[in-house]
Amino acid sequence: MGNFEEESLVGKQIEYQIIVRREAQLEVQEAFHYYQGKSEGLGFEFMRSLDASLQSAKRSPFVYQKIYQEIRRILLRKFPYAVFYIAEERRIVVIACFHQRRSEVDWLRRI
């Protein structure tokens, strides 16, 4: 017979907590207001895209490419934005939500 503790852990998924740093929160708010100003409802579409990306990272945080040391990037669908995060033991720490044309130097200062 196998070890009961090992057998009971098979198939269980770790629940990750998403933590969004203040700078990233401000970037998300700025993008929301920008898109909402362009077209009514577009800001909410941006937020849905962001949420879908974060949920994907939460389900499988280590599948996204490392782009610098432990920092990973996930691209938003339909919007030219990327979320930069660090996957830790039980947390996903979002350090930035940048337009893809923005300089990498900006988010590198946050690590």
Image: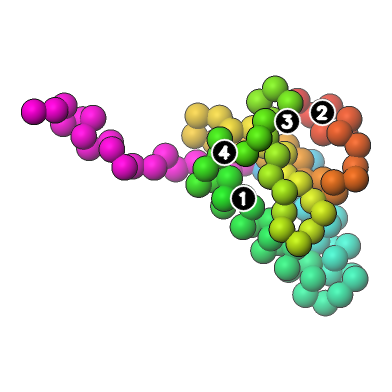
Q: Which amino acid does label 1 sit on?
A: Leu
Q: Which of marks 4 and 1 is in front?
A: 4
Side (left or right) of 100 relative to 69: right
Return the residue at label 4.
63
Name the quadrant of the N terminus. top left
Q: Name the residue under label 1.
A: 54
Say which amino acid is labelled 3.
Ile
3D distance between C-alphas at marks 2 and 1:
20 Å
Does residue 33 appear to the left or right of 51 in the view shown? right
Say left or right for 75 vs 3.
right
Does residue 97 lie above or below 2 as drawn?
Answer: below
The amino acid pointed to by label 4 is Val
Instruction: Name the residue carrying label 2.
Output: 108
Q: In which quarter of the image is residue 86?
A: top right
Task: Check whether the beta carbons of the residues at disc 3 and disc 2 lie within 8 A of each other.
Answer: no
State the image coordinates of residue 39 (x, y, percent, origin top left). 86, 75
Looking at the picture, tell me which residue is in the foreground, 72 or 106.
Answer: 72
Q: Which residue is drawn at 56% across and 35% down?
A: 62
Question: Can residue 27 be seen from the camera position used here?
Answer: no
* Residue 25 image point, x, y percent: 75, 48
Relative to the observer, which residue lies in front, 74 or 58?
Answer: 74
- The residue tagged 3 is 67
Please tell me whether mark 4 or mark 2 is closer to you in this view. Answer: 4
Q: Is mark 1 on a helix, strand or loop?
A: helix
Q: Is residue 66 visible?
A: yes
Element assignment for label 3: strand
Observer-side mark, 3 or 1, equals 3
Q: How far apart are marks 4 and 2 (CA)?
A: 21 Å
Amino acid type of the residue tagged 2 in the rendering = Leu
